[in-house]
């Protein structure tokens, strides 16, 4: 059996499984349930607080065909494809490794491709590592509704484009 890191093995699949981030989960679940999600979100907080996991669950919920009270079903074709990493509606970019203008341009080009789901979701992990030019390219893109990403640091202009969702370190009682 291939090695699988702990955070991937125990990654939450639904909002209900996310521990210690009730304020973020409630806001996102309500946005999905009421069909009032913003065009961009910024998840920030210390390492290990569930920013990327929460963004992935949010992406599933936005595209789930059997949504129940804002929770993804994890069984429909869209949910299964997102969990398997084969969805045409979810794009993840590791901005620590892909931090140049070309990476952002490539991401913007992907927005032109038709996808089967309701919403395309873009998760830019470690977005604070983007170069100044890439940050400016991202800002231009954010002026139009299309990106979802997470980071703890962004230029002030980028931060104003996104409602904040600050993750907090979990306490031992909230994890158990």
Image (spheres, grey):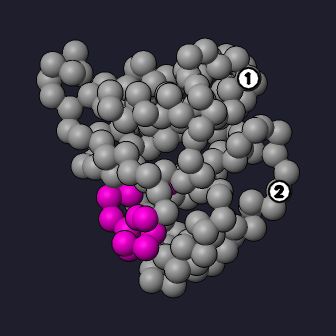
Q: Is residue 156 magenta?
A: yes
Q: In this view, does 116 lie to the left or right of 78?
A: right
Check residue 65 in the rendering and tell me which mark sits there, or answer none: 1
Q: Where residue 15 sits: x, y (%)?
A: 45, 24
Residue 98 horizontal/vertical position (percent): 52, 69
Question: Crowding at label 2, few (<14), some or many (≥20) Cα neighbours within 10 Å?
Answer: few
Reading the image, the residue beneath label 2 is 113
Query: In this picture, which residue range is highlighted in magenta?
Result: 149-160
Q: Nearer the viewer, residue 4 or 172?
A: 172
Quarter-of-image position of residue 61: top right
Q: Which residue is drawn at 37% across and 72% down?
A: 156
**Residue located 42% across and 18% down the image:** 16
Give the residue at x 71% y 43%.
119
Side (left or right) of 114 relative to 9: right
The C terminus - image quarter:
top left
115 lies above or below 35: below
Tag on residue 52? none
Foreground of the two, 54 or 40: 40
Q: Of the residues under marks 2 and 1, which one precedes in the sequence?
A: 1
Apparent side of residue 65 relative to residue 39 in the rendered image (left or right): right
Q: Which of marks 2 and 1 is in front?
A: 1
Q: Where is residue 34 in the image (x, y as percent from the top left)?
A: 59, 28
Label 2 vs label 1: CA separation?
Answer: 21 Å
Instruction: Tell me which corner region of the image, top left, top right, bottom left or bottom right, holds residue 129.
Output: bottom left
Circle 1 packing at 10 Å, graded few (<14), some (14-19), many (20+), is some
Residue shown at 23% from the left, 21% from the top: 175
> Along the horizontal axis of the image, is 136 left or right of 86?
left
Q: Which residue lies furthest to the bottom in this view?
A: 133
Badge 1 marks a residue whose secondary structure is: loop
Secondary structure type for disc 2: loop
**Is residue 112 found inside the magenta-colored segment of the image?**
no
């Amino acid at each position: 059996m291939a090695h699988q890191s702990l955070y991937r093995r125990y990654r939450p699949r639904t909002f209900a499984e996310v521990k210690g981030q009730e304020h973020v989960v409630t806001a996102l679940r309500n946005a999905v349930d009421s069909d009032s999600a913003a065009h961009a979100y910024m998840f920030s907080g210390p390492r290990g607080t569930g920013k990327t996991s929460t963004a992935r669950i949010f992406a599933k919920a936005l595209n789930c065909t059997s949504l129940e009270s804002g929770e993804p079903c994890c069984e429909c074709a869209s949910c299964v494809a997102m969990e398997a990493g084969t969805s045409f509606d979810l794009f993840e970019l590791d901005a620590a490794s892909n931090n140049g203008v070309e990476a952002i341009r490539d991401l913007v080009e992907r927005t032109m491709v038709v996808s089967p789901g309701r919403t395309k979701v873009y998760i830019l992990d470690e977005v604070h590592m983007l170069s100044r030019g890439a940050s400016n390219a991202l800002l231009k893109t954010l002026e139009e509704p299309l990106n979802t990403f997470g980071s703890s640091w962004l230029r002030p202009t980028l931060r104003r484009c996104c409602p904040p969702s600050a993750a907090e370190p979990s306490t031992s009682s909230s994890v158990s």
